[in-house]
Amino acid sequence: MATPVILITGCSSGIGRCCAEGMRKRGWRVIASARRAADVAALREAGFEVISLDMASGEAVAAAATEVLAMTGGQLDAVFLNAGYGQSGPVERLSRQSLRDQFETNVFGNVDLLTHLIPAMRAAGRGRIVFNSSVLGSVAIRDHGAYVASKYAVEAFADTLRLELRGSGIHVSLIKPGPIESRFQANAAAARARLESREPLLREKRYPFTLGPEAVLRKLVHACEAHNPKARYPVTLPAHLIGLLRRMLPTRLMDLILARVG
Ligand SMILES: NC(=O)c1ccc[n+]([C@@H]2O[C@H](COP(=O)([O-])OP(=O)(O)OC[C@H]3O[C@@H](n4cnc5c(N)ncnc54)[C@H](OP(=O)(O)O)[C@@H]3O)[C@@H](O)[C@H]2O)c1
């Protein structure tokens, strides 16, 4: 059987980088993507096949999809839609542009990329589509409205695709991490500073039960390799707990709990 191929977006750091390393170790042919030239070069240096991809650009997404399919002769067994960032700030202070930017990267880029890649998966009669959502794809916390909305939208597209791809051999999964060690907080601080036109204030906060990115890798491996991948993979204790409470408690009680988070 041919070596399975996975495309992973957002491999410059954190979860994407860890998953690129981990899937390669498992014998996958990994095509890693990053948007900055220096990160593309560093990934090449580390021995990866790399494409340059800014998820916020429709032209870049179309070009990247064409490039990936040309590199693999049309074979793509899995795609991990991982690239993303958190736009924080209270809803009443979000600018229209900051919302556009958040959705361009976290939502539109993913769907756009899939419209280019799904035909190849359909032709092959198999494929795995894995979205990196968040525990915040199911519940809201203060000061993160743009990010929460983007992850709810990701979940909506994944749920819809799962229905539309039923019987095609293409499986769709959502990974829902709680706190994971990465550059996420630093990048979120930069996005917040852009919104407020000031220098970033980085107060790295370590949330309880934070795990390393390998915890996400383990779920990605299952989503890509298991005969029956799951629709949703919570990662970390808070993600499991919040999911459970969300299903059990009325909104008023959930609000009391969630008002304390953040
Ligand atoms: N860390 C957590 O606690 C956590 C929890 C739940 C969900 N997640 C999700 O996990 C995913 C990965 O985040 P992470 O924790 O690994 O954080 P990270 O270290 O900040 O990595 C984010 C990756 O996304 C890339 N990215 C951001 N905007 C992009 C764009 N427009 N085009 C292409 N790439 C872009 C970043 O590239 P640059 O280096 O160029 O910015 C980086 O490679 C995100 O979707 C995030 O929402 C993270």
Image: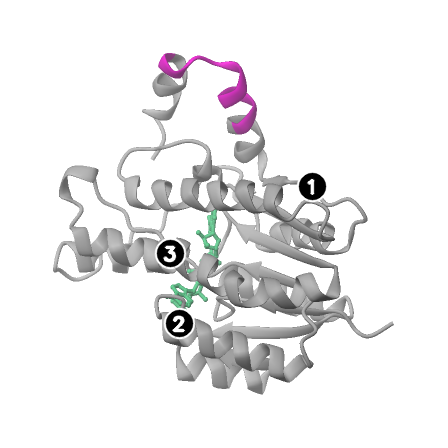
Q: Which of the two residues, 100 or 38, is positioned nearer the viewer here?
A: 100
Secondary structure, magenta segment, majority class: helix
What's the CA distance linking mark 2 and mark 1? 29 Å
Residue visible at 82% across and 74% down in the picture: 2
Q: Residue at x 61, y 75 (%)?
A: 31
Which mark is drawn over residue 85?
3
First-in-chain label (2 vs 1): 2
The kind of residue on which mark 2 rests is Asp
Q: Do callouts 3 and 1 mark residues in contact (Cβ within 8 Å)?
A: no
The magenta region covers 243-252
Q: CA distance from mark 2 to mark 3?
A: 12 Å
Query: Which mark is drawn over residue 230?
Result: 1
Residue at image point 67% right, 69% down: 76
Q: Could you say whether the residue bearing mark 2 is in a helix, strand or loop?
A: loop
Query: Would you say the beta carbon of the disc 3 residue lies within 8 angstroms of ligand 1?
Result: yes
For residue 206, which quarter of the picture?
top left
Closest to the camera, between mark 3 and mark 1, is 1
Residue denoted by label 2: 54
| Cα distance between the residues tagged 3 and 1 | 24 Å
* Residue 49 counted in the magenta span: no
Indicate yes or no whether the magenta region holds residue 244. yes
CB of residue at label 2: within 8 Å of ligand 1? yes
- Residue at the image point whose x is 54% and y is 28% from the top: 243
Residue 36: percent from left, percent from top: 39, 78
| Amino acid type for the residue under numbered disc 3 | Tyr
